[in-house]
């Protein structure tokens, strides 16, 4: 009888620790319909910011975005993140672009003067920038909480001539482990979940 109770107790403990892995991702997007997007012929992509990823993973994310955007906008010339970074450096505008980003992410208001200067110097019509935010990871605790990773990805496109926000999309994603004995899911796995939502909301410009 004691043996049976012990077995039942062990089974109950296992069932408590086991369960289904949970995951979810949401998307919110915005398009400014008042901007003449038909004037956008060239767009410069910048490397995604805040990425606690391997270099190969960051490049994979950038390449997926380029491919997705190109399929939606085959008539727009895309300047790759590496080339854009080089161009900013050669034009001595890397510092001003960093200043622009810090100001924008704090205030939500783009600095029109800096955007126009970059647009004129690099001969581009728009800039696309992404950022990974609010990364949270928790390893599973035996008999307690399961492992969890959550994060947010935000992408923005600014017109360098109008100085306005053309498009923005934000995706929040989370993934939990199946048991309380596992480490937090890899950041890259959750980034891919959020990124899939971003890819599904890419705008059609210049039409």
Image: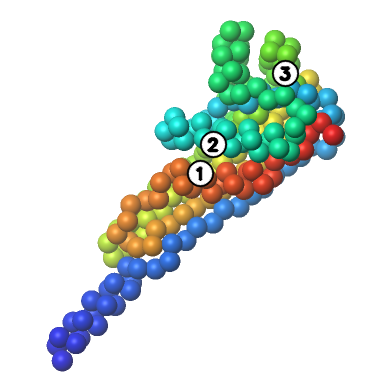
| Label 1 – label 3 distance at C-alpha | 28 Å
Q: Please report contact status of discs 1 and 3: CB closer than 8 Å, yes or no.
A: no
Name of the residue lying farthest toward the left: 2
Work out whether residue 159 can be spotted.
Answer: no
Q: Is residue 177 left or right of residue 205?
A: left
Tell me the mark number nearer the camera, choosing from 2 and 3. 2
Q: Looking at the rendering, which quadrant does residue 1 occupy?
A: bottom left
Give x and y (percent) for residue 117.
Answer: 71, 12
Secondary element at image label 2: helix
Mark 2 or mark 3: whose residue is earlier in sequence: 2
Say which residue appears at 54% left-offset and 56% top-offset.
Answer: 24
Give x and y (percent) for residue 97.
Answer: 60, 18
Mark 1 or mark 3: whose residue is earlier in sequence: 3
Q: To which residue does mark 3 refer?
A: 124
The C terminus, quarter of image: top right
Q: To which residue does mark 2 refer?
A: 61
| Label 2 – label 3 distance at C-alpha | 22 Å
- Comparing 142 with 47, the one in front is 47
Q: To which residue does mark 1 refer?
A: 191
């Amino acid at each position: 009888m004691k043996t049976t109770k012990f077995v039942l107790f062990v089974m109950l403990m296992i069932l408590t620790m086991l369960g289904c892995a949970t995951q979810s991702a949401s998307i919110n997007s915005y398009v400014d319909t008042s901007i003449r997007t038909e004037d956008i012929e060239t767009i410069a992509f910048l490397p995604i910011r805040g990425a606690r990823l391997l270099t190969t993973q960051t490049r994979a994310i950038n390449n997926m975005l380029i491919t997705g955007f190109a399929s939606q906008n085959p008539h727009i010339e895309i300047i790759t993140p590496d080339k854009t970074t080089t161009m900013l450096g050669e034009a001595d505008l890397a510092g001003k672009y960093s200043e622009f980003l810090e100001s924008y992410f704090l205030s939500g208001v783009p600095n029109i003067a800096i955007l126009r200067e970059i647009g004129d110097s690099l001969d581009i019509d728009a800039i696309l920038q992404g950022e990974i935010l609010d990364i949270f990871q928790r390893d599973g605790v035996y008999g307690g909480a399961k492992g969890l990773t959550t994060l947010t990805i935000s992408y923005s496109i600014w017109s360098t001539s109008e100085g306005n926000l053309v498009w923005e999309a934000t995706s929040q994603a989370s993934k939990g482990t199946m048991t309380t004995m596992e480490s937090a899911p890899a950041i890259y796995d959750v980034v891919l979940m959020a990124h899939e939502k971003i890819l599904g909301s890419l705008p059609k410009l210049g039409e």
